[in-house]
Amino acid sequence: MSTKLRIVLCLKQIKTSPRIRADGSQASAAFTFNPDDETALESALTLRDQHAVHITALTMGPPSAETVLREALARGCDDAVLITSSVLAGSDTLATARTLADAVRTLSPDLIICGRRASDGDTGQVPPMLAGILGVPFIPDLLKFDLSDSPPAVVTFARAEPLRRPSIMGLRRARSTAVRIIAPDAGYPSPTRVVRSTVLAREVRRPRILTPADALTLLMKPVGADETPEVQPAQICEEAACMVVDAPIPLAFTLGYPVEPVSLPALPVRESALFLAGRIRRDAPAVVLAPATSRCRAVLPYTAALLGCGMTADCTGLRMEQGELVQIRPAFGGDVLAEIVTSTRPVIATVRVPDAARKVLTGGAGLGSRGMFERLIRIADRLGMECCATRAAVDLGYADYARQLGQSGRIVTPALYAGIGVSGAPQHLAGIHGGTRLSVNIDRTAPILDVSDYAVLMRAEDVLAEWEELLGL
Ligand SMILES: Cc1cc2nc3c(=O)[nH]c(=O)nc-3n(C[C@H](O)[C@H](O)[C@H](O)COP(=O)(O)OP(=O)(O)OC[C@H]3O[C@@H](n4cnc5c(N)ncnc54)[C@H](O)[C@@H]3O)c2cc1C
């Protein structure tokens, strides 16, 4: 019998939006690797470079999802399993995690590696739910994994080297290896259901062009305390409780339910989830809410899986409608608001709570280096602004994740936002609600200019140098 350590690598095939070609025609949607799964795959292969490891790539999806498995085989995975059946279409995160868990059990791995989140649904719930169903620890956002003391666990990696290219041998193996097919006759029920999707109208502003000195005057102007938009207040009141986990959540989110605060113990994800599941079973709240922090994004889905409940991630609003609690969350990069109801009780959700930053100075990939970002931090400090970042700036290593604004980062409702070298991707803009906006960009066609009130159309390095001189930095 083989003594190799067995890894199951969970991958997801993602459908990209259709692209418009240069001649105006529309190219059909392409299927690609989920970006975070590239990190997961490279992390698994790096472990295999150092240890005796057998890697099985596993995916659930339509028959076309076999492509991602062949990509994984070409790069060095040993075998591959595809779970595919029409009964699985439309599975939510709990149904998906249960289906994956069934397959994982048949493979008896020592370690299960998942991508942090899939770029389409963007909930990040399947890995912790999978761990909860399997009853193993969940260790998110690893930088490095030490195999010597690994229990069976589900892990995700925060970053890895860029995904290696396939070798000639690998390409041959990918062609000749048979992918094992699992075709279930029945799927698990999905406790969450999208009841409505609203496409959001895009606002268009025409920015006034400023010099760097005028832009600095704008940034130095004090902002009033009363300009932050309010979250809409509660509508209903019932006798059952709303359990609020680990933080104050604005009363508007608790919809008039009596609030029962619960603090998570300072324990790993699995133990915290076992504690929380115990409290939920004992107190039977109607609703369980937690802020969408990285810790609660791990503990709440694990808990939901222990209880057999569905859950919704990253809600920006909650509403009662005909006795149903409707959970509102952005989808498709913030272009669409999805309204979701849950059939299991309690209703469990993480909510995105806007933080208190009043003036934010945000650095993007256009800054070009970590050194430039550090200069931006000094300027922000001098101006009494909070220095934030785009995901690209975080991925490039210019800034820490804690600074990231957007769909998968923090959400702010500032009176004044300035974006330096930021293109204005919908996923970034999803994190900025309201306020006056200034952009510094070399590209006058950058999408962020359509949502800016003021713009400096110059190189970031020149603008920062002029601000530093004017501020005596
Ligand atoms: C599921 C998912 C979730 C995501 N979540 C987030 C999120 O939470 N937050 C987020 O920010 N992104 C998020 N993204 C990524 C998002 O789609 C964009 O890739 C990202 O916001 C781009 O960051 P950027 O504007 O810094 O970089 P780019 O898009 O590369 O833009 C750089 C800009 O800098 C300008 N520029 C270049 N050089 C200079 C210069 N010398 N001086 C001035 N300007 C210059 C360019 O013209 C360009 O407009 C997410 C993506 C996915 C798929």
Image: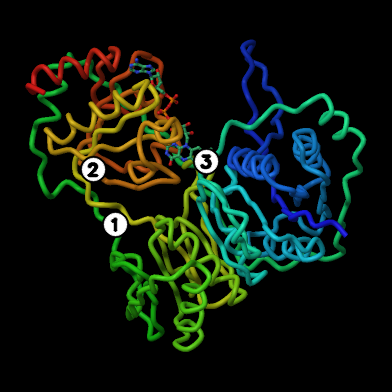
Ligand 1 occupies quarter: top left
Residue located at (19% from left, 44% from top): 358
Residue under label 3, please give it: 159
Q: Secondary structure at mark 3?
A: loop
* Position in image of residue 123 (x %, y %): 54, 53
Relative to 202, 37 lies left or right: right
Q: Quadrant of the N terminus?
A: bottom right
Please determine whether, in this image, residue 47 is positioned above or below residue 97.
above
Local crowd at mark 2 within 10 Å, few (<14), some, or many (≥20)?
many
Please determine whether, in this image, residue 323 is positioned above or below residue 69.
below
* Position in image of residue 342 (x %, y %): 56, 68
The first of marks 3 and 1 along the sequence is 3
Label 2 amino acid? Pro
Residue located at (8% from left, 37% from top): 222
Residue under label 1, please give it: 231
Q: Secondary structure at mark 2?
A: loop
Residue located at (67% from left, 37% from top): 33
The one nearer the camera, 404 or 313, is: 404
Q: Secondary structure at mark 1?
A: loop
The first of marks 2 and 3 along the sequence is 3
Which mark, residue 414? 2
Label 3 amino acid? Arg
Residue located at (36% from left, 26% from top): 422
Which of the 4 quarters of the picture holds residue 291? bottom left
Label 1 amino acid? Val
User: Between marks 3 and 1, how big is the CA–CA gap?
Assistant: 35 Å
* Position in image of residue 310 (x %, y %): 58, 68
User: Between marks 2 and 3, how big is the CA–CA gap?
Assistant: 30 Å
User: Between marks 1 and 2, how big is the CA–CA gap?
Assistant: 13 Å
The one nearer the camera, 11 or 314, is: 11
